Amino acid sequence: MRKVLNLGEGGALAAFVIPILLVVVALPLVFVVLQAIFPDLGSGSLAAPFSQVAETFGDPEIAGWTLNTVLLGVSVVIGASLFAIPLGVLRGLFRVPLAELWDLLFLVPFTIPPYIAALGWIMTLQPGGYVQQLLGFNLGPFLFSFWGVVFAMTLNVFPVVYFAVSRTVASIGGRYLEAARVSGASPMRAFWRVTLPLATPAIAACQLLVFAMAIEEFGTPAVLAARSGFLVLVTGVERKLSDYPIDLPGAALLSTLLVVLAMGAFALQSWVVNRRDYRTVGGKQARIDRRDLGPWTAPVVLGFSVAAFLGAVVPVAAVILTASTRTISGGLNPDNFSLDHFAQVVANRGGAMDALETSLSLGVVAALATGVIGTLTAYIVVRHKGPVSRLLDFLTLIPNTIPGIVVAVGLILAWTQPWLPITPYNTIVVLVLAYCCLLLPYPVRYANAALRQIGPSLEEAARVNGAKARVAFVRILVPLIAPSMIAAMLLVFAVAARELVATILLAPIGTKTVALFIWRQFEQGSVGLGMAMSSFAIAITMVIPILVTLWTRKREGGLLE
């Protein structure tokens, strides 16, 4: 450790970054574990370790919540895979008409906050909803059930699988399939024996991400399935923290169980990827040579159209339609359409504009903080190999496997200890800490990838010419990785500006954010006003990634095939 920390500028950076990561990332998880072990930790006592375990896990509801969580996660993974893998393979291997348009539309469901998409589906499929008004049948019983939750969550996360599969299959290329065909393999056999094994690591990685997203999602199960009695661990944790008497040890134990499930999924993914080694031996990236669809063009376009309609058009249209009607009972009557709710948001009714301003400010602060920390961390990991760099790499990977509600519980436990002389709890700072913990992996991964493409020779040349290490870093590396970092920071901004679950648990009394405003409007029955604010949230989360994508492609020399 001493040898690594004596690396001059690298050691100084590590000494600066490590305490920040320990506070932002490690501290919440440590206190979740400590609270699970010591039930009286909140009062400063380490007495009676593990005494709450039997009582908590002896509750028959916990077993049901755990089973529901696993069942939901696995079902969403299966649904997203069945929905997105065929589309991704087609996009990667064939010339799909309007391919760039489908890619753009498939970004939409991923950028819509899940709880807003769920609210959009409620307005569409509930009794008296838009489907019943237009087509005459009621799909409410389906929506407010387990399969309704799976349906809504699948449509929200399938782009994760689609983009991973399409890019991976395209990079593999079709020439290996052609080689297999020449050797006598049928098209299906060539796909199963060549393309699919080579794409397995990417598929397994995105399925792990989908599972983690499904088991940590709070809004969709809360608004769709809770009324039918289908509860999961996330809603159970929220109940233990919101219902009197507050059960901190129980919440910590359930949070620990969520972490175990996420880690188990990570271990399973590693086993799937590593049990066999599939790779090409040429060392060159395959030339992208997509083939024509021929007579399958119309069915494929129809399939992409259905996916885009269900994933992007329906939820967005439902939100905008609801925001544009005076009353829900008035339905799609032309006389019922109005911009009153949008005007009320702009007029700051209920603190709407205050909430928007707070969310935008929090997003900016989180983006700047994670951008700086992520760049410095990635620089140490890439340029200075050793125990410290491995520790930093591990710390920045942890948030990928920790559900957001666990981070929130950990921050509550860490910063409400009676012996602390000062605490950020019940201030806006605790929200920044939560967002930084949850979203730090994005800038770190982006910066890591960008730095690996830049050899150390540029820095060495600057040092030879008398520049100090920090000057070379600021004047050479930062400008070169700036495009990647700006893209990552804009993504952090978009996600932080509409984050829900950590905000519900951590927001100080009187604080208003976009997510809290929307949630509370629906609780109070002001659906139209909530949907108007949802429209603003969708605009923020849709426009920013689209602008980032177009800007990045413009820098790369135009739109790519």
Image (cartoon, rainbow, N blue to C red):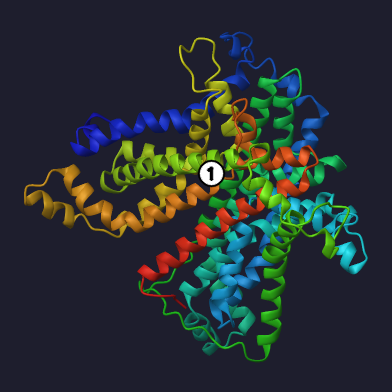
> Residue visible at 7% across and 51% down?
464
Q: Amino acid at mark 1?
A: Ala
Residue 237 percent coordinates (x, y): 70, 31
Which of 277/30 is in front? 30
Determine the residue located farthest toward the left in the rendered image. 465
- 175 is higher (above) or lower (below) than 348: below
In percent of the image, x 30 and y 54: which residue is there? Answer: 451
Depth check, front residue: 473 or 116 = 116
Q: Is residue 6 above or below residue 453?
A: above
Quarter of the figure that contains the N terminus? top left
How many numbered dots are placed on residues in this image?
1
x%, y% of residue 411? 55, 27
Answer few, some or many: residues within 10 Å of disc 1's Cα (few below 14, many 20 plus, some between 14 and 19). Answer: many
| Residue on which disc 1 sits | 496
Q: At which x and y percent is residue 219?
A: 70, 43
Q: Quadrant of residue 53?
A: top right
SS for callout 1:
helix
Side of 394 relative to 402 (left or right):
left
Q: Position of residue 212 (x, y in %)?
A: 61, 46
